[in-house]
Amino acid sequence: MPESGPVLRCGARVLDLSAPVVMGVINVTPDSFSDGGRFLDPVRAVERGLSMVEEGAAILDIGGESTRPGAAPVSAGEEIDRVLPVIERLASDLAARDVPAILSIDTSKPEVMRAAAAAGAGLVNDVRALRAPGALEAAAATGCAIALMHMRGEPATMQHDPRYEDVVGEVKAFLLDRAQACREAGIGADRIAIDPGFGFGKALAHNLELLRRLPELAATGLPVLVGLSRKSSVGALTGRAVGERLAGSLALAALAVFNGARIVRAHDVAATVDAVKVAHAVRSRDHAVRNRDTAAHDIGGQGLP
Ligand code: HH2
C-alpha cells in the first residue's frame, strides 16, 4: 500500500492530518449506548454539532442507527429521515460560518451514503468496511473519504466469546484487504482511513493488544482512526458506568495518539482535543530538546520547574 501522507481527501476538501484530529460523535438515534435519545431532535443534534466544532472537532460523525449489541435494526428510509435534516442544516450553518469541518456519515447502507454525500457529507464511516451489497460502488461514486472499520461478526452476537489466533495480524490483514478492494473500485489511497474497531467482536484483552500494537496499523501508511470513547473496555478497567468514563477515555485517546492514531472519535470533544494535543506533543519532534539541555537535566535537574 503506497504511503498516502498525512491527509485525507474528503470530496472537495483535504483534511490535514499532520496533527491528529478529533471526530465528534452525534448519534441521531433513540438507543445508542451512551447518547441514545439525546439528539433524536434534529435541532438539538445541530446545536451539539456546532458546539463540538467550537470545541475543536475537525469532523462530525453523524449516525442514524446504533451498532450496540441488541440495538433495533433501522430501514434505509428511517435512517435517511433521521440523519439528512441534521447533515443539511450543519452543512449550511458551517458554510455560513466559513468553518471547514468535515461531515461524516456513520452508515453501512448505500442509499444512506448517497443521500448524505448529496447533502454535504465528505466522509463515509462504515463499521462494516463497505461489505454490504452495493456499498463499495456507492461509496466510490460519492467522492467522499472512507473510514474502513474492522468488525468480527454482527452487532447482535459479536461479543459472544470472540476468538483470534493473532488479533493484530488478522485485523490488519482484513483492513488491507478492504483497502485494496477500495483501490480496485477507484478510491485513491488518499481517501482511505482504517480503524481496528475497538469493541466490535473483541474481548478486553484483544482491545488492549490492538492499542498496544497500534503502530503496526499506522505503519501501513493509511491514517488510523480509533473509537474508544466511553466504551465497555473503559467500564471493565475502571468499574465506571457509561456516563463516568471520561478520564478513562482520555487516557486511551492519549495512548492511541502516542501510538500513531490520526483521528480520534469521541463524545467529549473539548477534553479529547486537549488530550490529543498533549499526546501529540510528546510523540512529535516539535518540542525536541538540544542535547546540552538533556545533559543539564541528567546532571543536576537544572532547568526543571
Ligand atoms: N464505534 C461506534 C460507532 N461507530 N465508527 C468507527 N469508525 N469506529 C468506532 O469505534 C465506532 C464507530 C459505537 O459508538 P457509538 O456511535 O457512540 O454508539 P452506537 O453504535 O450505540 O450508536
Image (spheres, rainbow, N blue to C red):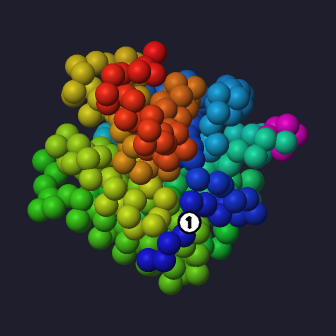
- Could you tell me residue 217's position as x and y percent? 35, 60
Residue at left 16%, top 43%?
205
Inspect this view and state whether residue 99 appears. yes
Q: Quadrant of residue 152?
A: bottom left
Q: Position of residue 40 (x, y in %)?
A: 59, 30
The span shown in magenta is 93-97
**Disc 1: which residue:** 5
**Is residue 170 on the magenta stretch?**
no
Dot 1 beta carbon under 8 Å from ligand 1: no
For the N terminus, give its image quadrant.
Answer: bottom left
In the image, residue 160 above or below residue 112? above
* Residue at x-position 64% and y-position 33%: 56
Q: Which amino acid does label 1 sit on?
A: Gly
Q: Is residue 240 left or right of residue 114?
A: left
Camera sees residue 36: no
Packing grade of label 1 (10 A; few <14, some 14-19, many >=20) is: some
Mostly what secondary structure, the magenta segment? helix
Q: Residue 64 versus residue 276: which sits nearer the camera? A: 276
Q: Position of residue 31 (x, y in %)?
A: 44, 32
Q: Is residue 94 magenta?
A: yes
Q: Residue at (75%, 53%) from the top-left corner?
A: 119
Q: In the rendered image, which quarter is residue 251 located in?
A: top left
Which residue is at the far right?
A: 96
Q: In this orientation, which residue lies closer to the viewer: 266 or 1?
A: 1
